[in-house]
Amino acid sequence: MLSLRIQQLGGVTIVRCAVRIAFPDARGLRVALLQQLRTRTLVLDLADTAAIDAAGLGVLVSLRAWAKQTNRKLKFMNVTPRVEQLLQLTKLESAFEVCSAEEMLDLLCRAIHEGESVAAATSDSRCEWVGRTLDERTALGA
């Protein structure tokens, strides 16, 4: 059974998909994303996604088309090796944008700095922390 956790930060919505994006639950992912009317960027976190079947692929392709038509961005993050292999097998790896952890942090920092949902004082401290190197964070006691 598909499990979704939706988090919003300004114009960015992160949807964590757990278990399987498969029939009959795949349609629930489509419905959940189509309800995110105020977001400009949708990020599917696939870290806990074990498998995607044909119905799931169909939903992802239809969501990609919807995002293009509505001038939204649809991105994947934390793509598992199994899902990556499926996208390669079906020749869909180039159809979807996959963002790295660094790109995701940059995206979230921009959303914060735009002041869409978080106070400026909070955003400055978070982005300052994100911008530090691992060595700097370690030296600061993180």
Image (cartoon, grey):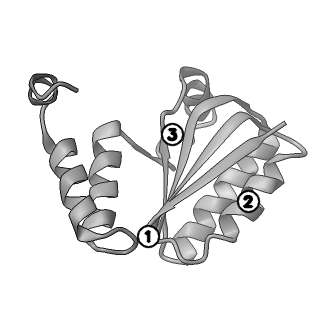
- Asked if the residue under mark 2 is in contact with the one under mark 3, i.e. CB atoms within 8 Å, the reply is no
- Of residues 135 and 105, which is closer to you in this image? 135
Residue ID for mark 2: 30
Residue at the image position 27 percent from the left and 73 percent from the top:
114
Q: Relative to 97, does residue 11 appear above or below in the rendering?
A: below
Q: Is residue 42 left or right of residue 17?
A: left
To which quarter of the image does residue 115 belong? bottom left
Q: Is residue 90 left or right of residue 105?
A: right
Residue ID for mark 3: 93
Residue at the image position 58 percent from the left and 37 percent from the top:
46
Task: Return the disc, 1 or 2, that comes first in the chain's sequence.
Answer: 1
Count numbered badges in the picture. 3
Q: Residues within 10 Å of mark 3 (few under 14, many from 20)?
A: some
Q: Relative to 89, does residue 109 appear above or below in the rendering?
A: below
To which quarter of the image does residue 45 belong? top right
- Of residues 8 and 125, which is closer to you in this image? 125
| In this view, the mark in front (1 or 2) | 1
Q: Residues within 10 Å of mark 1 (few under 14, many from 20)?
A: many
Q: Amino acid at mark 2?
A: Arg
Q: Is residue 86 left or right of residue 120?
A: right
Q: Amino acid at mark 1?
A: Gly
Q: Amino acid at mark 3?
A: Glu
Residue ID for mark 1: 11
| Secondary structure under the numbered disc 2 in the rendered image | helix
